[in-house]
Amino acid sequence: MGTKMPLVIKQNFVKGLKIKREITYSPDKKNEYMSIFNELKQEEIIQKGVKFEDLKWVVWNIGIEICNLTFELPFHQRRWELALKAWALYQLKKRVNRDSIRTKINLGKEIIINSWGFSDISGLTQFYDNIPPVKQNTFKAVTNEILNFIELDDTLSNKIKDIYKSKRKQKRQRQLPPFSEIVKFHEAVERLAEDFTETEQKKYAPLILWWRLTNILPMRPREFTLTPNECILKHEDGYILRVRRIKHEGKNDDEQIIEEVPITEEAVQWIKSYKELTKDYKQNEYLLCYQMHNEITNGRSGIISKNQILSTDILRRLLDDFYEEIIFHKYGLTHGIYKLKDHRRILLMETRHLAICNMLFMNYSPHTIKLLAGHDHIHSQNPYAAHMDLYVESQVTMLTETFQRAIRQMAIGNTRDINQIPADLRNRRIYKVEDFSRLWPLPHGCYCLYTPLDCPVDDHRYCPYLFIPKENWEDALEWLTDCSDRLESEIKTTLDFLMKIRKDPSKRGEANNTAGKLNTLVHQKAIVDAHSKELKYRNWEI
């Protein structure tokens, strides 16, 4: 049996971790792990040709069969990949069966992903509740091994163990899916909105509109499907949306009233684009077009609407198809098709929760949120406020994806001889200083594609026009990481302060200023993280 591998985990590296002398996990120990990796290669336990940096290791199982160990995690949890590799090395050193190691690594990734890096235990609870009983003992064993390996603090460790120790005879109320899944779903929606076939556009237009609109305005699924066709009103201060509100949800004789709520010009454009797409079809009093849906699916949805209404059942079927046809088959964002009751799936009703989180983020007054959400009491907002740290983190992640695409396109647009570069190479090319028509030098070996004198930001790390040559990637990455860590700390402090003062009417002005500062910090961190992610993306391609 091998000895326990020394690891050090920095307290500020992963939330909730406790420093222990016998465990010292840190990126600074990478050389030590690589040494063990090379020893295992010499012993032909790890196949020749495999590199430590690879996200997939090929190992020999009993000398005659190969087994793949895959460590890839979502970008925002990639800090755990090195920890997984260290854990795998420890298992290999102890000569644990390779298939068993693979099972442990795969389940370990699920535990990390569904607990949002052990920061959202509710996600892990839902994951465990959906595991078949025959696999729950494996979950318990692997969870215990992870907890012993990284040594979480006792309070957090006990909370995780309570997930499978408690019998939970009563069915738990479903909570939001992990925010990593929300980010993944959002990415698929926005990609499809720009990259679609005619069939995909017509089929999924109602679902895209549902996701976009109900993420900013708290609407129940049925309220969304009953949105009036003539729903937009021009107002002197902007636009008003006519929304059909339902009282006593679930009863046959529901009371329906029309409310008028302010919306953004962007939301108006979403609705106008949908109406333009459906203008050649027969219209009724509702915005969503049943005729277009019935035509594009050839009536194969199996759901017939006598009133020619695109019902919540149809919208739910579109959501099922979206997970299979778009998220899995078209974009490959999941490793398989999520089952209907999988806790990672987003349900139609959950965008209402996200919309309320968004209003908290934008510092809507408690009274306004109460009216827009249809709550009876202001206190009903408390459960949503508890999710704000994860919501803000998801906003950073989604904006990072957007900014990364913009940064890549910006570099292409500023090159001198772009027309001489084949189209399929433009997004993958590593640009050099001489490729650009004009550049201005900045600290840390970076350059500005804009005019520094006119630059609207104080720190160039917040600017999408930042260009970093390949020879300076290593220094620049450290520079960017320091900034990202500082911004993360500022975001948490600012958010905590906003949640503390938001219900005090005498501090509305201060709360508005704090919300504005929070929004700025989120955008700044997203741009910084986009630069970092782009450097890592380019580095992996080489």
Image: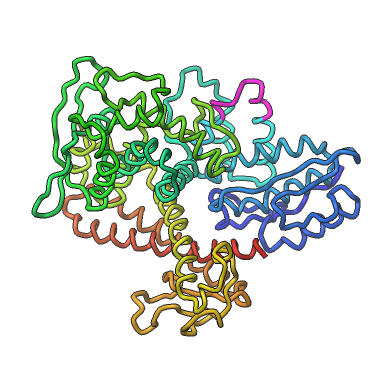
496, 176: nearer the viewer:
176
Residue drawn at x 46%, y 53% as measured from the top left: 397
Residue 427, relative to residue 96: is it above or below?
below
Residue 495: percent from left, percent from top: 35, 54
Residue 90 covered by magenta stretch: no
Give the position of the C terminus as an image quadrant. Answer: bottom right
Numbered circles on residues, count? 0
Residue 146, relative to residue 10: is it above or below?
above
SS majority, magenta: helix
365, 184: nearer the viewer:
184
71, 124: nearer the viewer:
71
To which quarter of the image does residue 512 belong?
Answer: bottom left
Q: Give the range drawn in magenta.
A: 128-138
To which quarter of the image does residue 51 belong?
Answer: bottom right
Give the position of the N terminus as an image quadrant. Answer: top right
Residue drawn at x 90%, y 55% as measured from the top left: 42
Residue 473: percent from left, percent from top: 60, 72
